[in-house]
Amino acid sequence: MKKLIAILTLAAVITSSAAFALDGSTIDNKKVMESFNKEFVGAADVSWYHTADKYVAKFTMKASKVTAHFDREGNLLATSRYITDAELPLNVITRMMKKYPDQKIHSVVEYDAEGNTTYVITLESDTHWTVLKAESNGNLTKLKKLQKA
């Protein structure tokens, strides 16, 4: 779990100003490119970013926006993608509907790292936003509750 949090933190850092955009849909690291091409056949609109020791590819695949994180050796570390509420596990949806019946789903991001899948779900009501972390087994954790202006 600590590693997953570290990877999610890395994702935030990489998308911040510390990341450097690379031109084109390829990079100069052969191992990373081979791994990317093997894992994500059919990826379109690929953009690459990097830090000193990580590479990040942002792309679309079957109409989904996907982000993939690689180390310099070409190992896939984590992925994230926007999904619809229909793609959430049934136990997540049912628990969420029981616990937050007055809120509608605004967005869902699926994170996959080290074989663990988690979801960050943003719910919306008339007065506030609620951000949840959901595990595949249906466990829900409230991350934030924000009042609307």
Image (spheres, helix red, strand yellow):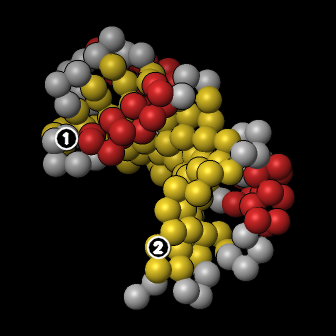
Between residue 131 and residue 23, name the one nearer to us.
131
Amino acid at the residue labelled 1: Ala
Identify the secondary structure beneath mark 1.
loop
For residue 146, the mark is 2
Say which mark, if any, is on residue 19. 1
Q: Residue at x 61, y 24 (%)?
A: 115
Q: Is residue 85 left or right of residue 35?
A: right
Residue 106 drawn at (x, y percent): 58, 70
- Look at 48% across and 51% down and name the residue there: 65
Between 95 and 45, the residue placed more toward the observer is 95
Give residue 50's quadrant in the image: top left
Q: Quadrant of residue 97?
A: bottom right
Residue 57 location (% of width, % of height): 35, 37
Q: Amino acid at mark 2?
A: Leu
> Residue 76, labelled with which disc?
none
- Can residue 40 be spotted in the picture? no
Looking at the image, residue 139 sits to the left or right of residue 10; the answer is right
Residue 138 placement (x, y as % from top left): 76, 46
Mark 2: few/some/many CA within 10 Å (<14, 14-19, 20+): few
Task: Kindly identify the residue that appears in the image at 62 percent across and 36 percent down.
Answer: 117
The answer to whether any part of residue 60 appears in the image is yes
Residues 94 and 28: in front is 94
Q: Earlier in the sequence, mark 2 or mark 1?
A: 1
